[in-house]
Amino acid sequence: MAKTSKLTPIVYLVLFKDDRVLLSLRKNDVQTGSNYSFIYVYITDGEAPEDSLIEEVKNEIGLSIEKDDLKRALVIHRHPHILELFFTVKKWEGEIINLEPEFCENLNFFSPYDFPDNIDPVVEECIEALKKGKSYIKQGF
């Protein structure tokens, strides 16, 4: 019998406003270093991706999002054990505020055609895939 793979699921919020995307400048983050990235959360056992993301967004930047307003935009399966889910949202309530300044140095909107130099590669990869209409990427298999 084949061994069952244990995946590490990561869920990202790709929030656009006026054709610009929200990015968070992380502070010495384990995954992204000190780069701009999407708001994201690792899912723990028993959590639904959407529920985890909604809670993280509320806790990190103060926005309220309804589950029905999230749209799965992209899935990246990185061999061997990482599954990344990217959700977009066009409707939310509240104002964006940095509620975790110990982890986030800055929140800002950027044109997807003019990112800062210190960008997490996953952001560029996601945006390029969305521009090309891709919804699934498989890497390392």
Image: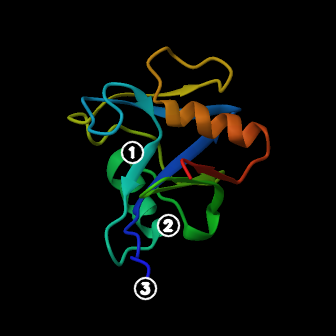
Label 3 Cα crowd, 10 Å radius (few <14 / some 14-19 / many 20+): few
Residue at far bottom of view: 1
Q: Position of residue 62 (x, y in %)?
A: 39, 49
Task: Tell me the residue at 32%/25% (across/down).
Answer: 34
Task: Say which amino acid is labelled 3.
Answer: Met
In the rendered view of the protein, which quadrant contains the N terminus?
bottom left
Q: Left or right: where does residue 118 sit relative to residue 30? A: right
Q: Are marks 1 and 2 in contact (CB under 8 Å)?
A: no
Using the numbered discs, state the Cα–Cα distance from disc 1 to disc 2 in whole angstroms: 16 Å
Q: Is residue 141 above or below residue 68?
A: above
Q: Position of residue 119 (x, y in %)?
A: 47, 24
Image mark count: 3
Task: Tell me the residue at 57%/45% (across/down).
Answer: 14
Task: Say which amino acid is labelled 1.
Answer: Ile
Q: Earlier in the sequence, mark 1 or mark 2?
A: 2
Using the numbered discs, state the Cα–Cα distance from disc 2 to disc 3 in whole angstroms: 32 Å
Q: Are marks 2 and 3 in contact (CB under 8 Å)?
A: no
Task: Work out whether residue 126 or residue 114 is closer to the camera in this orientation and state it.
Answer: 126
The quarter of the picture where residue 114 lies is top right
Residue at far top of view: 117
Residue that numbered label 2 is attached to: 50
Task: Work out whether residue 82 or residue 118 is closer to the camera in this orientation and state it.
Answer: 82
SS category of the residue bearing label 3? loop
Q: Position of residue 60 (x, y in %)?
A: 34, 47
Q: Is residue 117 above or below residue 2?
A: above
SS category of the residue bearing label 2? helix
Residue that numbered label 1 is attached to: 61
Q: Left or right: where does residue 102 sit relative to residue 54? A: left
Label 2 Cα crowd, 10 Å radius (few <14 / some 14-19 / many 20+): many
SS category of the residue bearing label 1? helix
